[in-house]
Image (cartoon, rainbow, N blue to C red):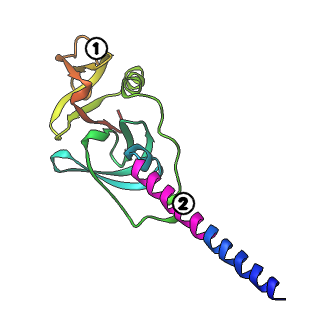
Amino acid sequence: MRWDSLFEDLESQLQAQLEAQFRDEVAENIRIERATEKLAGKLASLAGCTVHLHLAGSVEAVGTVGPMGEDYVCLDAEASSLLVTVKAIQRITMASPSRSAALPGPEPSPVKLPALLRGLLRDRSRMRIHDGWGKLLAEGTPTQIGHDFLIIAAHPRDEFPRESSITEHSIVPLAAIGWISIPRGY
């Protein structure tokens, strides 16, 4: 009888030690995971949520988080679609996070910014390009996307980018882009 109680006591102590060790390992893994998380991953968890992006130059953009890559996020705003580079984001605010916002979202797309811009070039999308501080760099339709630059043709808003309507071409380094606004209805 005495042996039974001794073994039960030792087994319960061992079980308590194993549970404590498991809790410590889980807590350490969570700390490591949180410490190595990147902004793109955090943005991915907000996919489909409405957020306020506080951008450089005291600009605030409100919209639904859409597709994103390592260095950009697409935001579906009321008046336009925005392509925001991560370097232009100063702060992100949202309503109290819901349970669904805490779940991991899709992985950031491997599509890099130049490839995304080439898609906009094919669509002949009119755009407004701002630098990292909110200053308008160029407005018009892109005509070429290079490895690290784009060329945009300026023309009147109510005209298509034909040679007769183009007033100038601007070369914009991709590194200078803070965000791109693509107005709806164009």
Q: According to the image, label 1 marks what residue?
A: 162
Q: Which residues are magenta?
A: 19-36
Q: According to the image, label 2 marks what residue?
A: 25
Please identify the quadrant where the N terminus is shown. bottom right
Q: Is residue 3 left or right of residue 88?
A: right
Q: Is 74 contained in the magenta span?
A: no
Residue at image coords 45%, 52%: 32
Would you say residue 160 is visible in this rendering?
Answer: no
Q: Is 29 contained in the magenta span?
A: yes
From mark 2 to mark 1, how far is it between C-alphas? 64 Å
Asked if marks 2 and 1 touch (Cβ < 8 Å), the reply is no
Work out whether residue 100 or residue 20 is closer to the camera in this orientation and state it: 20
- State whether residue 175 is above or below residue 80: above
Q: Is residue 177 left or right of residue 116?
A: left
The dominant secondary structure in magenta is helix
Residue projecting furthest to the front: 2
